[in-house]
Image (tube, helix red, strand yellow):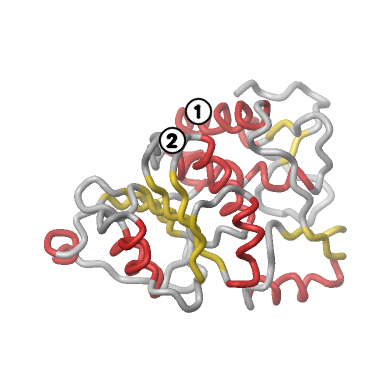
Amino acid sequence: MTTAAPGAHVIGVGYGAFADYMVLPAMAAVPVPKGWSDEQALGLVVNLPTAVAAIKLLGQIEKGQTALIHAAAGATGQAAVRIAKHYGATVIATASSEKHEIVRSLGADHVLDSRTADIAAEVLGLTGNAGADLVIESVGGETFEASLASARRVSGRVVVTGLPAGKASLTNWNLVYKHQVHIIGFNMGALIQAAPEIFGAVMGELFALIGAGILPPVQPTVYELADGPKALAALEDRSSIGKLALRL
């Protein structure tokens, strides 16, 4: 990824996001694609690179494999569905029932109800009892166990990107005798600091997907700053779809 020139239109993430000015490392200043608004560009710094890293660079999805993507109606989940389909995967997605049509419109092959389905049983049923080759685990809590149980034994990968539903525990006994899978923890800040070469590859792949039209600009739901509590409530009760934005 090429460093942005002085005066370029960029977006970034860091401490002091409500300040008038912010100092960022050059690598963290992401050029905004031509024609994208500031609001549409919000996903460039967390959601879209997370999806690229989880599906391809770390998840190593390949054509003909199966990917289970949780929270598929969220900003990262929507991008992950598009990317996995682009690489030729069969996508099993989870979302609450009122969001299923949105997820299907992105190309998901199967959509499971995240609130009522026995996810592991349904994934095994859809894959001939083999399990998913890749699981994007972005929920945590009880869903973490379902994700492990949904992954293909020995070669299955579970990329953990978040835990909004709470922490989950895992023992070495589980890994040896119950869930023989690859577990990959992902944090964008850690990736930038510890493996900048991988982060560069992620951003290069991201802009290639944008250039090819695989990841078009998506308009978030915008709240005025004074309505920030409403945005947080939408996240908490899981009624939000896609990206949320606060307008200063």
Residue at position x 82%, y 60% in the image: 222
Classify the position of the C terminus by image quarter: bottom right
Disc 2 or disc 1, which is closer to the eye? 2
Q: Quadrant of residue 170?
A: bottom left
Residue at position x 50%, y 71% in the image: 114
Given residues 86 and 230, the one toward you in this image is 86
Where is 44 relative to 237, above or below?
above
Q: State the image coordinates of residue 243 (x, y, percent, origin top left).
A: 70, 57
What's the distance in space between the residues labelled 2 and 1, CA to CA?
A: 8 Å
Q: State the image coordinates of residue 61 (x, y, percent, origin top left).
A: 40, 39
Given residues 187 and 112, the one toward you in this image is 112
- Which residue type does callout 2 highlight? Leu
Q: State the image coordinates of residue 55 (x, y, percent, origin top left).
A: 46, 42
Q: State the image coordinates of residue 50 (x, y, percent, origin top left).
A: 53, 46
Q: Which residue is mark 1?
A: 201
Left or right, residue 83 beside residue 237: left
Left or right, residue 229 beside residue 157: right
- Which residue type does callout 1 highlight? Ala
Secondary structure, mark 2, is helix
Q: Which residue is mark 2?
A: 57
Residue at position x 86%, y 71% in the image: 226
Classify the position of the N terminus by image quarter: top right
Given residues 163 and 94, the one toward you in this image is 94
Badge 2 vs badge 1, beta-carbon distance below 8 Å: yes
Q: Earlier in the sequence, mark 2 or mark 1?
A: 2
Left or right, residue 148 beside residue 110: left
Secondary structure, mark 1, is helix
